[in-house]
Amino acid sequence: MLAMHMANELLDLPTSALTLALGAAAVGLAIHRLRGQLPPEKLPLLGVLGAFVFAAQMINFSLPLLPGTSAHLGGAVLLAILLGPSAAIVVMTAVLMVQCLLFQDGGLLALGCNIINMGVVPALAGGWIYRRLLGRPESAGGTRRYLACWAACTVGVAAGAALVPVETLMGGRLLIDARDFLAVMLGLHLVIGLIEGTITSAVLGFLARVRPAVLGLSAPPSQTTPRSRWDRLAMPLPLLATALLLAGLGSWFASAHPDGLEWSLLRGGEHSTLAQPTGLAATIDRWQKRWSLMTDYTRRDQPLGQESAQNSSPPAVQSAWPNPDGWKSLAGLVGTLATLAALAGISQVLRTRRHARHADHAP
Amino acid sequence: MHHSHIDKFAQQDSPIHRLDARAKFLAVLAYTAVLVSYHRYALLELAPLAIFPAALVALSGVPAGFVLKRVLALCPLAMMLALAAILYDPSPRAVALADWRWTLPGGVLTAGNLAAKFILAVTAMTAVMCATPFSLLLEAMRRLALPAALTLLLGFLYRYLFVLSDQAMRLRRARDFRGAALAPMSRRLAASGGMIGSLFVRTLDRSERVGLAMAARGFTGQPHSLRRLGFGRGDVVFLAAVAVYLAVCRFLLA
């Protein structure tokens, strides 16, 4: 799926230094752990698997319901499942570094953020959840593997994406409201997680048949197991769960804003024509404000000079945000279910018509 | 098959090519850091910073059209950010150039600032990458205290990147020739899973073979390179010039 590499412009220098240091520490730890597991001459061979990630991202898959768009694999969770989290972190780091250096995909200063968001977090969270939900590989069926894959990819990808607003907020470079940004990123990545989970589970299904050893199986699963009712539920279940999560998120988001237009007017009213502070004194001043802001930033009543127009949303909106009475959530859920049913009906109709047309054309 | 090799100009010769890879890497890093440190309404202040990427492109002999095409290909994301800025920040701000003063919405200034920063950073990075072979860059990173395991791994990644991309392209072409677009969704999904899965199996086998072949030639996990990096007087002059230039841009002209 569309990779969300962060650009340099979303960060400031302290944040990028901090995230680079954190990313470097995580990668160093992963390399240290790998040294214990692999002989030294085998470690560089992981680079070939990094090239595999690039190649696998070229195999695209056109999406249903969204004509014209296509998805591809991210890869971190798949690698974490197949090779373990340490190897996945190291391989994804190499992939992100090449993407940054050779293809200029993601900024040089944002490399630390990208390693954390798209490598470390998905590999750790996704790998852990997959192992937790799968149980023993021998006894897990295809349905259970699919559900574990979906959960691992959704949580891994969404957790990484949720860090983007946090990192941007730390640098004070956020143009839009942090919670709006968070809601949009989470919503987008719930969908991406569903797609990633589905493709990952298809890959794992193939590998279970062809090369069971990489999944920790001793023999390929027998082909003769009868399909139970549970198996037929397997495909729609994550779809439904993703839709419900999206609906919950959407109504939470909607309850935050009394009215879109009114809200934008509220913002536009607060014009700030302050002159920019310049010089060394201003720089030191900004640093001080930044560090005091990081200890408790919600209480800051006068934000940093030029960011004032963005961060000062009125307190009424803030307190109304996490809507405690769940009515809007319920309405959102019901609406989503209805929309989903309508979509399923339409696609069913379209499919039967298309099949009929193909049947007509066949001689 | 055809790839748009980013480093197809890396083997040429020019003053930029002859510089030490460490000097070039550090210069671009410093340039990017200075670029990012400007506040979000800075637009005219960024103008002198365009000299560095322009000089890199001109001196390295990389065709400007090639660099421009790469920058344009990467632009959509930055343009999305810039558009968001225009929509979210209508507060008026004063802009002054010599005697002229006028006011613009802050969002427009921010959008211009974001776009300028993005284009300048990508141009500088592309120019340096076009003037540095990847192997020398890896050697430089190793000397700059990156773990040898990681740089070696990056070398392997780069070596097999285009080999495996070819393989993936062949798989994709085979799928498209067999009319995959007409298949129902579940079949297409299974086909994608099979393609990526078989690519993974082949990659595992390939890395096994590569490992055996390298072990047979006495590889113990240590990198060996005939190419030597030399940090000469020219590199010191280059780094000093870049430092002075950046300091002048940031503290005297801004």
Image: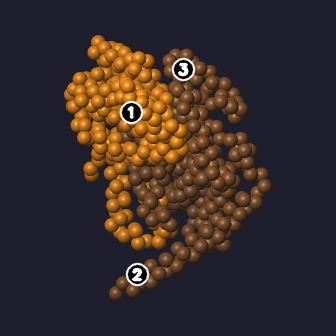
Q: Chain of mark 2?
A: A
- Give the residue displayed 64% in from the left and 54% down from the top: A259
| Chain A: drawing colour | brown
- Give the residue displayed 53% in from the left and 39% down from the top: B91
Mark 2 or 3, nearer chain start: 3
Q: Chain of mark 3?
A: A
Q: Position of residue A342 (x, y in %)?
A: 59, 73
In the picture, which chain is orange? Answer: B
Label 2 vs label 1: CA separation?
A: 52 Å
Say if mark 2 contacts mark 3, CB within 8 Å: no
Task: Left or right? Give the position of A83 relative to B34.
Answer: right
- Give the residue displayed 44% in from the left and 25% down from the top: B34
Task: Left or right? Give the position of A196 relative to B248.
Answer: right
Label 1 vs label 3: CA separation?
A: 23 Å
What is the count of numbered marks?
A: 3
- Give the residue displayed 41% in from the left and 47% down from the top: B76
Q: Which residue is mark 2?
A: A358
Closest to the camera, between mark 2 and mark 3, is 3
Relative to B172, say whether A74 is above or below.
above
Residue A283's tag is 3
Q: Which corner quadrant holds the C terminus of chain B?
A: top left
Visible in this render: residue A234? no
Q: Which residue is mark 1?
A: B121
Report which quarter residue A362 is drawn in.
bottom left
Q: Position of residue A54 (x, y in %)?
A: 41, 47
Relative to A208, say whether A103 is above or below.
above
Considering the numbered disc 3 on the image, is that residue within a helix, a strand or a loop?
helix
Q: What type is the residue that disc 2 sits on?
A: His
Of residues B106 and A69, the one nearer the viewer is B106
